[in-house]
Image (cartoon, coloured by chain):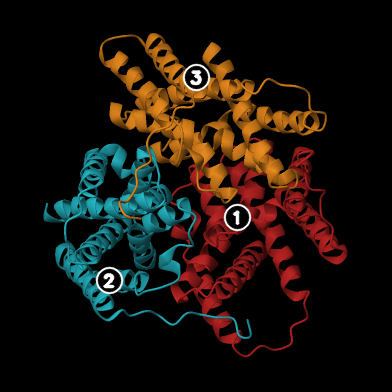
Chain colours: A cyan, B orange, C red
Amino acid sequence: MLLYLLDMFGTAVFAVSGVLLAGKLRMDPFGVIVLAAVTAIGGGTIRDMALGATPVFWITDTNYIWVILITCAVSMVAIRRPRRVPWYVLPVADAIGLAVFVAIGVNKALQFGASPMVAVIMGVMTGCGGGIIRDILAREIPMVLRTEVYATACIAGGCIHTIALAMGSDAVTSSIAGILTTLLIRLAAIRWHLSLPAFDLPGK
Amino acid sequence: MLLYLLDMFGTAVFAVSGVLLAGKLRMDPFGVIVLAAVTAIGGGTIRDMALGATPVFWITDTNYIWVILITCAVSMVAIRRPRRVPWYVLPVADAIGLAVFVAIGVNKALQFGASPMVAVIMGVMTGCGGGIIRDILAREIPMVLRTEVYATACIAGGCIHTIALAMGSDAVTSSIAGILTTLLIRLAAIRWHLSLPAFDLPGK
Amino acid sequence: MLLYLLDMFGTAVFAVSGVLLAGKLRMDPFGVIVLAAVTAIGGGTIRDMALGATPVFWITDTNYIWVILITCAVSMVAIRRPRRVPWYVLPVADAIGLAVFVAIGVNKALQFGASPMVAVIMGVMTGCGGGIIRDILAREIPMVLRTEVYATACIAGGCIHTIALAMGSDAVTSSIAGILTTLLIRLAAIRWHLSLPAFDLPGK
């Protein structure tokens, strides 16, 4: 239940990141909604399609769509009268959403009989997939592929989650362990601006 | 039956728009076919994958592929000896195809048990999805996200369609009401060059 | 069995091509893995989603993921101490992988009851789809849509494969005929730098 509320929170936060990018690109209201929606539910949609968990989750539970629509409406109004929001609010909210999305992806994959390794991949896909599609639509090379300890945090969280399960922890404890791992690594990365060394071809 | 013919007509018109973009980008014949195909059947493919309506429609009914291949062949020949075609022919044909695609998407989603809101989304996805994928392949920011009353017409048509159903109209009447709504809004937009105001971040 | 080993070989070769592009774009290690993975298994994933063959193949058989991860690790190390590799090694290896992927795609589609034409399309999608997604993620217009006898070789191989089946050959013989067709056309194209004439709009 708490996980469900956190899921809706993550959906809203991810939608905001889509709205902000759409605003930067001067999209019309439909573009704003599309970018918000793919960011929020794109990763989970590909996950469900690959798992064969169709109809995908937001067809069965329309709350996701409502959260996205309301988030778009609110943020398009709010953005016109900017108030001082501390810079760290959005990244921290994003980190919470990310951590929850990874845990949900891991759980759903295991539920459909996937192996632990595939479950971690599905967790990462749930967390990062939406942002990648958003950046493709906005014609940018996806940020997550280039910089920051973003995907790495998801991988670590997913691994801790599945390892905890393999060691006999119950689903709730394992999920919490995974969520905290993802969250703490992301918060540390935000705090100290960590980034993995880029892989580069020599002599280019 | 008439709807099926209109569906094939829409497939051909959408394929032409893919061919034209491929020509502008100097693609080889394979690229032309790919761009024509994703424009014509890309939206419906994602819809079917999300609904779990697999194998997707063009695997079951190969007429779609034939229409695309023939359209590519004809338009690659026709384009070499340009004749005077009034400028409004293509947009009007596109508007008819769009209106039909939306209605088909709405009907298919309802048939798979989706709620009315999801049905409208699936209608819009059927109508606009192909053009978005086409623009991604051609490395352009999808036009439909930036300008013109294109998606809006689809949303309006889908809403009228589902509202008519909810009010007790039969499937055929509701589909026609939806198709006419989408079509008239598109034609009005083409005639008077309507466009929604872009959403913009202040001070950027 | 041999086909399975060749499939793994193709997966590794395609992954290398993803690694090389990721290196050129200075992606971080996660980006390298993502680009390697989409190149290697992206085409087959879309094929399986469209056919409704879910969960998709790499969820059921995790060897694909292991091959990709090991390939990434090895090639990121190997690239730092470049040795003289004749220029033709990579394209020839790629041609072998491509030919095998097409045959696998054709067989899988037929197994799911697709018509011969759709089977050819699925073969081409298996062979070329991954490279197209890789190029989209790297924000390039997919090479396969613009140049070289790449997709054409896949189409020819897929056609020979299904024609051989239709003429009564068994699955193994037909697959070999298809693989050799794709392979020989690719090798000829590499040897003599063949390319289809680009389709161009007149007066542009």
Q: Check the image and report above or below for B14 versus A151.
A: above
Instruction: Please tell me which residue lies in front, C2 or A122.
Output: A122
Total labels drawn: 3
**Secondary structure under the numbered disc 2 in the rendered image:** helix
Mark 3 lies on residue: B187
Mark 1 lies on residue: C132
* CA gap, disc 3 and disc 2: 52 Å
* CA gap, disc 1 and disc 3: 35 Å
Q: Check the image and report above or below for B73 versus C177.
A: above
* CA gap, disc 2 and disc 1: 30 Å
The answer, for residue C118, to whether it is visible in the render is: no
**Of circles 3 and 2, which is in front?**
3
Where is residue B32 drawn, in percent x and y? 70, 41
Where is residue C83 drawn, in percent x and y? 70, 89
Left or right? Give the position of B187 relative to A122: right
Instruction: Please tell me which residue lies in front, B47 or B157.
Output: B157
> Mark 3, chain letter?
B
The answer as to whether the residues below labels 1 and 3 share one chain is: no
Image quarter of the C terminus of chain A:
bottom right
Give the residue at x 62% y 90%. C81
**Of circles 2 and 1, which is in front?**
1
Left or right? Give the position of A38 relative to B99: left
Where is residue A125 drawn, in percent x and y? 38, 60
The answer, for residue C165, to whether it is visible in the render is: yes
Give the residue at x 15% y 67%. A173
Mark 2 lies on residue: A157
Label 1 close to label 3 by CB (< 8 Å): no
> Label 2 crowding class (10 Å Cα cut-off): few <14, some 14-19, many 20+?
many
Disc 1 marks which amino acid? Ile
Give the residue at x 54% y 57%. C42
Left or right? Give the position of A13 relative to A200: left
